[in-house]
Image (cartoon, helix red, strand yellow):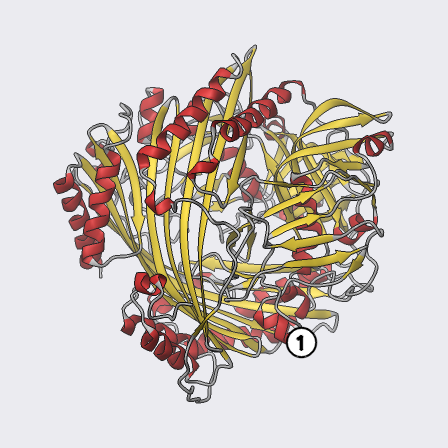
Amino acid sequence: MHTLETHPFAALFGIDESVAAQALSEAMCRGAEFVDLYFQYVRTASLSLEDGIISSANTGIDQGVGIRAVIGDQVGYAFSESLEADAIYKAARTAAAIAEGTKNMPPQNLQGRETDNYYAIDRDWDEVNITERLPLVQSAEAMTRAMDPSIEKASVGWMDRDERVLIVTSDGVFSMDRRPMATLYCSVTANKNGVRQSNGASVSRREGIDYFTEENIREVCQKAVDRTMILFEAQRPPAGEMPVVLASGASGILLHEAIGHGLEADFNRKGTSIYATMMNEKVAPDFVTIVDDGLQENDRGALNVDDEGQATACTTLIENGVLKSYLHDRISAKHYGVSPTGSGRRESFRHVPMPRMRSTYMLDGPHSRDEIIRAVDYGIIADTFTNGQVQIGAGDFTFYIKNGWLIEGGKITAPIKDVNIIGNGPEALKNVVMAAGDAVLDDGSWTCGKNGQGVPVSMGVPTMLVEKSMTVGGVN
Amino acid sequence: MERELLQQAEQAIEQARRAGANDAIARVRDENSTEYTYRDGNIEQVQQSATRGLSIQLYVNGRYSTHQTSDLRAASVARFVEDAVALTQHLSEDPHRVIPDAALYEDRPDTDLQSDDAVVRDLPREACIDWLKKMDAITHIDDRVVSATSGAYYGWNTSARVSSNGFSGIQSGTSIGYGASVTLKEGEHGRPEDHRYVRAHHLSDLPDPETVAREGLDRAISRLGSEKAPSERATMVVDPEAGGRLIGAIWGALQARSIQQNRSFLADKKDAQIASSLLTVTDDPLMVRGLASRHYDGEGISTKHRCVVDQGVLQMYYVDTYYGRKLGWEPTTGMSSNLVFAPGEKDLNGLVSGIKDGFHVTSWLGGNADTTTGDFSYGFRGFRIANGQKTGAVSEMNIAGNFLDLLQNLVAVGNDPNVYSSMQTPTLVFDNVAFSGK
């Protein structure tokens, strides 16, 4: 096991145990109950290819330390981009001012927390030359263009990120994590008889460059092309309430919006979530089990350690239809007297951590996809999505369907497009009447926003049916 | 401070040139802010930020790239710029990537935009806490309140921009905002919520905190008993605070990039009647105290007042140097500033009183639009309007349509712009909108 002195991350940030201890002590000096230091170093590289040319390339370095002092549920927060000891101490004293007393923190030996690695990659992105990335983007563009003669424009975006964090807490533990992320985005505009349609697809995972094989690149490009071509035949569906089938995969956006956010414990300890008074109640049929999981290997939502230095976990939110747990950060876990769930996340060292989702998905149900489609006399099946939103207290949520189909007489018929769906979380859960055995995680580049902070997440569901209760934003 | 930022930018340009860049643009920004949140009788969070960053655009042998760093130690920056230039050498040549024409930097306006308020820079902590306590007290006068959070934010920023072809500029300003969000209890589990926040450059341009908090509470109370109404085609009254989302989506189709990439439903529509004659919009970067006011845009191009839509006829696109060259068009400006709408005769209430059957949209929930086709679908909440009266609150409803149809169906414009936004949308009234509900 490394001590802080010997750990390579500590060298990267240029801090030793005495600086860390002094910073903790400064942040504690007004009487805080808990303090953490969040050191972060991020390198990013991105490329975009348009009209056959790399139209822009970008690199970035972002580094700094965020210091938090906690007393009860009150938080003082400050950060410094400079990692000079004096700048760190100054930020620590600013954060300390949330408390109004005095306290001397006894000196302590910092112990390193060992964690498993859910996203080991062969080569860190830091070691990959720009000339190795260029052919990936260029091949994606060439493949896409070749897929259909009606394609007028194909553009490809690339982003990789090499993030290192070192978290030191006043309970004497330090944790570190190196988090890769790579995203490939392909977008297409096609023209048929003067009518234009555009769409896109992406893959985003905690992977290294070896993941981007021709086969994996082709899959994203093919999705982008297929999703564009079907738009030429797509219509707007009728307006109003109707049964909605959620295709397996990205339809997990329903769980994210309708349930996940409402179960973030900060909203519940404040009493502002519609789920605040539903713990241990039956909220869905028996076959519904929903988890939020940080342990999915190489998944966009995976975390070895959360941004408060807690080991991450797979948290069961709803088990056999019964509401079992919220998603906790340190403050809410203390408030409720439960173990943290490893869900404390933040966008960067400039931001305070909050309970956040990781990879939210529903386990397989007892039905088959065919059974589900056959059960719908008139409704829609939703397949691809762009975005969603929720009002935590009212429980009203939305998600935007980019591609889907009508279901008529138990059969999938005409394609549909551009439909906002709006529903109510607890109502939708009650109305989940069927779920198939084909659960899969979507690996699109989903970013969840909360209080102005974005964090990477993923989501998934088996094919499932929500009985008539949600409103389909069509035309009449 | 200004001198220091300019020097940092100049130095980065010098380093880029020495490393082999033909041209470079550097920007150094410095931002400070303090944010308080106060919830149910206690300070919940105090957050202080002081941040500085360098970004640089490089033109190297016909190749182009951009870079940014927050590690501003001299040795780190030197290495960073050197690496960036070396990386750029590996890219392919792009004939359209050239530094903006220096002629566009000329005639930079020097009017006083009044973007800076000394009061904000000297704001004492006690004043902020005092507002928060007042807002917290007002938002708790109703015993249905479960929780209410008041927030206040203030800060200032300065940014220096220098280019290798003769541009040098400094922009700075203060900002301040506050507001409250309120959650009520309704029935066993329901927690209807709403909020009111305001922001400006100057403290004196904001309504007092008590008024803002009261509006936040009243809005939350007005959400009680909300219901889903039946689907129908009806008139839509878009609140001044909600208009920005629609206008923003439409304005995305006016970007040269959207047009050049064949992703704009407004391509080939210049000089065409894209909206009813009631729509006249100007882009005014020189508005005194405007939230998006500036003397030069993101490319250093000197700003000026421009007419975007005149009585429904489209007058311009937002053209930057790069996509302008790809299209063979002269640059205008790459991004919108303050949008000002020619006002009608009435305010929101006056307009509602003339409507027989419709909905007043107060805010959107989710939804999206396709810039290529103009198709949109948005969730919303608001109120039912029947015979000139706002009746019950509605929720869980959507609208859907196409922007080209929607804009032609604009039947009234209010005289009540949202001055707390750079998109100063007034009340907008559209006929024959598809609403979906139960």
Q: Residue furthest left?
A: B18
Position in image of residue A386 (x %, y %): 60, 38
Position in image of residue A231 (x %, y %): 63, 22
Q: Secondary structure at mark 1?
A: loop
Q: Quadrant of residue B429?
A: top right
Q: In this rendering, would B90 be left or right of B333? A: left
Please give the chain letter of the residue carrying mark 1.
A
Give the residue drawn at x 72%, y 51%.
A396
Image: B101 above or below B217: above
Residue A226 appearing in the image: yes
Estimate how packed mark 1 is, as few (under 14), some (14 to 19) or many (20 or more) residues with alpha carbons within 10 Å.
few
Position in image of residue A380 (x %, y %): 77, 31
Quadrant holding the N terminus of chain A: bottom left
Position in image of residue B34 (x %, y %): 42, 67
Q: Nearest the camera: B157 or A20? A: A20
Give the residue drawn at x 63%, y 37%.
A385
Q: What amino acid is found at the position of numbered circle 1 in the picture?
A: Gly
Q: Residue furthest top?
A: A193
Image: A190 above or below A182: above
Q: Which residue is mark 1?
A: A337
Q: In this rendering, would A87 be left or right of B342? A: left
Residue B356 appearing in the image: no
